[in-house]
Amino acid sequence: MKRRAIPTLAVMITLGLLFPSNTHAQGKEKSAKSMPSQEEMMKRWQAYMTPGEAHKKLESMAGTWDAEIKVWMNGPDGEPAISKGTAEQKMNLGGRYLQQTVASEMMGQPFTGTGYTGYDNFKKKYLGFWIDDMGTGMTTMEGTIDKEGKTLTMWGVMDEPTTGEKNKKVKYVTHLLDNDKHVFEIFDVSGYGDKKPTMQITYTRKK
């Protein structure tokens, strides 16, 4: 009995090793068929990395700007606090990202902030982030521009340390009026809706 069991066991082990290997090979073959060719992958990556018309929209905001900043501290129906500032905007990394640096006053204190805006060719969306010396967090946003190429609308979330709120929904709108002026607005959607801004910055190109 023992002599007969050994060959039977050997056959079972052999089959057990053979079939998984065969199945694995079939899986690899199927995966290879579904994957694009090396040439196609390189073509897709080239398209992903190459700046296009969407990036030229960002480039139109490059330059040195005077900034008028309005902040509605008590809600958009009240009177805004108004301050002045300057902004430097330039394209970085081969025309892929717009870097912005703003220097002004906020609530009677010096204010400095910087951010980047780009266009993701794969997601087909504008992406951005902002940091400044009035906090320790980082604001991120993403969105699209209208068919006319004049209004860039982006959405994000922000925390409100003064009230303890986290992940408040915020809308960011940039109106590209002409080559020498654009207006950036922030809407506290959770608190006041998206019809009136709680902050507005008007950028006028320095001559």
Image: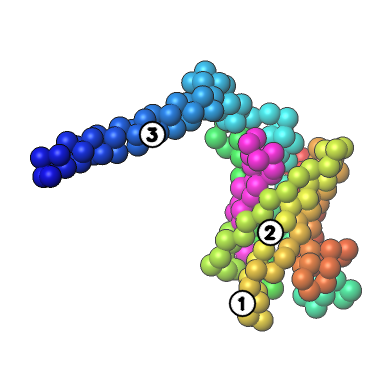
Query: What amino acid type is highlighted by mark number 1?
Result: Pro
Magenta stretch holds residue 30: no
Q: CA distance from mark 1 to mark 2?
A: 17 Å
Magenta stretch holds residue 113: yes
Seen in the picture, residue 147 relative to 199 is either above or below; the reply is above
Left or right placement of residue 42 versus residue 108 in this view = left
- Which of discs 3 and 1 lies nearer the camera? The answer is 3
- Which of discs 1 and 2 lies nearer the camera? The answer is 2
Q: Which residues are magenta?
A: 109-130
Picture residue at 73% right of the left edge, 30% below the top = 53
- Return the mark for residue 161: 1
| SS category of the residue bearing label 2 | strand
**Rendering quarter of residue 110:** bottom right
Label 3–label 1 contact, CB within 8 A: no
Task: Identify the residue under disc 3.
Answer: 24
Q: CA distance from mark 3 to mark 1?
A: 54 Å
Left or right placement of residue 199 versus residue 108 in this view = right
Picture residue at 62% right of the left edge, 56% below the top = 140
Q: Residues within 10 Å of mark 3 (few under 14, many from 20)?
A: few
* Residue 88 percent across, percent down from the top left: 65, 46
Task: Identify the residue under disc 2.
Answer: 156
Quadrant of the snapshot with the C terminus: top right
* Residue 177 percent across, percent down from the top left: 86, 43
Q: Residues within 10 Å of mark 1 (few under 14, many from 20)?
A: few
Query: What amino acid type is highlighted by mark number 2?
Result: Gly
Seen in the picture, residue 34 relative to 58 is either above or below; the reply is above
| Dominant secondary structure, magenta | strand
Q: CA distance from mark 3 to mark 2?
A: 44 Å
Query: What amino acid type is highlighted by mark number 3?
Result: His
Q: Of marks 3 and 1, which one's residue comes earlier in the chain?
A: 3
Q: Of marks 3 and 2, which one's residue comes earlier in the chain?
A: 3
Task: Looking at the picture, tell me which residue is in the foreground, 151 or 3.
Answer: 3
